[in-house]
Image (spheres, helix red, strand yellow):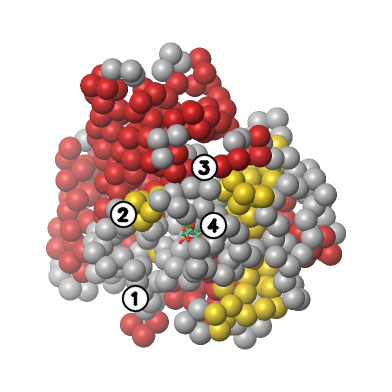
Amino acid sequence: MKLSNSYIGLPEEFFDSVYPTPVKSPSLIAFNDDLAATLKITLSDEEKIDFFSGNKVPSDSTPIALNYSGHQFGNFVHQLGDGRAVLLGEIRDKKNTVDVQLKGSGPTMYSRQGDGRSALGPVLREYLLSEAMYHLDIPTTRALAAISTGEYVARDEFEPGGILTRVAQSHLRVGTFEYFASRQQYEELKILADFAIQRHYPDIREFDNHYLELLKRVAQNQSLLVSKWMSVGFIHGVMNTDNFTISGETLDYGPCAFLDEYHPGKVFSSIDLQGRYAFGNQPSIAAWNLASLAGCLIAFIDKDADKANEMATEVLDNFSIETNQRILNLMCKKIGLDGESKSNQDILKSLLKIMMDNESDYTITFRNLSNQLVGESKKFLDEFKKDNHIEGWLNRWKESVKKENGDMKQLSLELNKINPLYIPRNHQIQKAIDLAYENDFTKFLEMIEVFKNPFNEDQRYAEYENSPLEDQKILKTFCGT
Ligand code: AMP
Ligand code: MG
């Protein structure tokens, strides 16, 4: 593991030097060989345990915790920072630089009242979800290793402790910008913006207005991200600005979840009492977070405040329009139609309305629609138990699909590459965690394999196709912090 650290070249308020706190008896639960290979990491089993538990630090590592603020549920929190994470360093190749971070590695100066630790459950959750997202082709941080610490952490009950090694394009967030902007530290803010440009969008240096372009790029990547979330039914659950990346990757898998039955107002998070981060609100929350970033950059966009305001507002307006269209395109694609056409959009919207009324499972419905093109799919029709509007809808849809596509068999195959069969459902994840707490990791390890191929049917994994039975349903998710 060849580690460097460009963050330590930044002014001292950006981070704090801190070593991970050693743990009692660590064991390696999972290691991501594929990711390790792409990062050219070769370590012995002993080194993996030592380094990813934080019991030893690689000789070329300068471990630090990063400083940031953030809006949590719309309220500004002046001081956050890595309270339970340590950046071991960066791995660079010619094209790319990534952060390697331990999460759950002990207290830092930003821990506030927290213990700096993580329970094993949330570690396994993040491992499964982030890797599943990666294989669904959704920008995300990744999981390199999961460690069980052999210690207990106090949450509602005592739980076994865990540490996740997370790999990210960087850990820069809107909250990092808010830290300096809220303190009116414009010099540091500019250094941060330049660092972000160099790290993520180096070609911006060719543009006249670097900071307006930075805002545009973050908006563009976040638009791609949120649209993809919507198309697979992913609810992030805590889209606070400290969890909203500059790279456009999904960050922090806390109380997140995939939809079972479709409802735009769906909320799982136990702390989201007003539904701020409900499924259907995600595009507007992304716009809200981008407005926060715009506020941080505004002074650099133009000296004339009115002009700067106008330019930033245009970016935000475009974000909303483009994201809306992007979602329509992706969603129409799921049903084999072109999203630019108004009548196709209507067909999509009526399907969603019927799905909502029938409490149809999001993933099963879209996946099995393709079978309706080549016969009758019981699995699809079973999702519409309450009313029969679906028959009329199917006729209307088939008519449009035939106009736009030649070969129905071919289209059916194509749709199966767009609509996943396997998504990490909460009830399955919870089962894997419950078993892990009894020292049985087989289900967790099996799930890692299942979600490597979310589109290809595999008889061995049939149980992962199903939605939860009534008594298996998980109604609430928790941060687990
Ligand atoms: P998160 O919910 O993981 O996005 O965390 C929000 C903030 O709380 C971040 O500043 C975290 O570092 C901090 N935090 C979460 N859990 C802990 C913990 N167990 N100990 C210390 N800080 C924590
Ligand atoms: Mg966070």
**What secondary structure is found at the residue carrying circle 4?**
loop
User: Which residue is drawn at the image coordinates 68% and 73% (left, top)?
Assistant: 148
User: Contact, CB < 8 Å: mark 3 with mark 4?
Assistant: no
Q: Is residue 175 above or below residue 93?
A: below
As helix, strand or loop, the secondary structure at mark 1 comes to loop
CB contact under 8 Å: marks 1 and 2: no
Q: Which residue is the site of mark 4?
A: 110
Residue placed at 42% from the left, 71% from the top?
478
Question: Splitting the image into 4 quarters, where does residue 278 fall?
Answer: bottom left
Q: In front here: 137 or 196?
A: 196
Q: Is residue 474 left or right of residue 93?
A: left
Q: How crowded is mark 3: few (under 14 residues within 10 Å), some or many (20 or more)?
A: many
Taking the image as shown, residue 337 lies to the left or right of residue 222, namely left
Distance from disc 3 to disc 2, alpha carbons, whole Å, reads 20 Å
Which mark is drawn over residue 475?
1
Residue where numbered disc 2 is placed: 75
Q: For the residue marked with disc 1, what is the amino acid?
A: Leu
Q: Position of residue 51 (x, y in %)?
A: 76, 59
Above-or-below relation of 42 to 223: below
Mark 1 within 8 Å of ligand 1, using the beta carbon: no
Q: Nearer the viewer, mark 1 or mark 3?
A: 3
Q: What element carries label 3?
A: loop
Q: Distance between the residues labelled 1 and 2?
A: 26 Å
Relative height, residue 371 to residue 342 (above, below): below
Residues packed near mark 4 inside 10 Å, few (<14), some (14 to 19) or many (20 plus): many
Q: Mark 1, mark 2: which one is toward the viewer?
A: 2
Residue type beneath disc 2: Asn
